[in-house]
Amino acid sequence: MHIGEEFGIFGLDWAKIHFVENNGMAFGLELGGSWGKLALSLFRVVAVGFLGYYINLLIKARASMGLLACFAFIFAGALGNIIDSAFYGLIFSEAYHGLSVMFPEEGGYAPFLFGKVVDMLYFPMFRGTFPESFPLWGGEPYLFFRPVFNVADTAITVGVLSLLFFHRSFFSGEIHEKDSPEAAQADLEETADMEIESTISEMTDGDDVSRSS
């Protein structure tokens, strides 16, 4: 597809595949300049590394599948955008002057970590005009939903919203206190001690009965 080319999903006017590229974050947001692009790419790499480490801790802490799924969505989405920005510039030609070519002879359009993220999901559902009494944007036209995004953006959004709506106790620290690896190990040790004490008690009671008989 050419940049800006689109077609309706199942022929719908409000759900489209619309090919765009952006230099920045989710939903087309970006930091200015090459340094901003590099900082964003490096931040993504660090964030994905931390998320992978933290998910491993949650697994060891026996966290719920729902909480793990939230972080897995965020991890997968961030990783997907990293792949775009890290490698697409190396393996594709510039798409603004025609169809992009994979592995062009002259090389890709950008160095490592400076590639553009491909977005394609576009849902212009509602158009209208804000009432004159509406603050700031009164009388101006609006379009919902304007941003073009991708599957990775969707995964990040679903993961974050699920955390906010269904796992609010996570932000209060209750999960860290209850399900940390140290707490899980302590629970196992406490359970083992209780079983040992119960066994000893049963054996002792049995001996007392024998003596009394």
Image: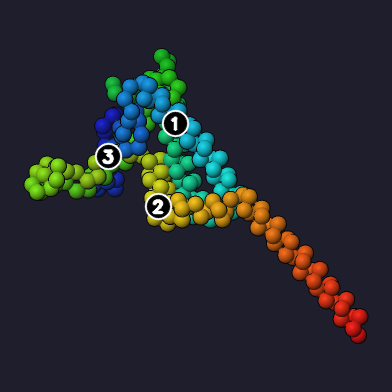
Q: Residue at x 19, y 48 (%)?
A: 126
Local packing at callout 2 (Cα closer than 10 Å; few below 14, some 14-19, many 20+) is: some
User: From mark 2 to mark 1, how far is it between C-alphas?
Assistant: 23 Å
Amino acid beneath label 2: Leu
Determine contact: label 3, label 1, CB under 8 Å.
Answer: no
Sort mark 1 into few (<14), some (14-19) or many (20+) by Cα contacts within 10 Å.
few
Crowding at mark 3 (Cα within 10 Å: few <14, some 14-19, many 20+): some
* Residue to which mark 2 is pinned: 164
User: Label for residue 147?
Assistant: 3
Residue sitting at x 38%, y 41%: 153
Chain-order first, disc 3 or disc 2: 3
Are the residues tagged 2 and 1 within 8 Å (C-beta)? Answer: no
Does residue 8 show up? no
Q: Amino acid at mark 3?
A: Pro
**Quarter assignment of residue 53:** top right
Q: Nearer the viewer, mark 3 or mark 2?
A: 2
Name the residue located 37 percent from the left edge and 28 percent from the top edge. 116
Which mark is drawn over residue 43? Answer: 1
| Residue 162 numbered mark, or none | none
> In the image, residue 71 lies at what x, y percent?
48, 46
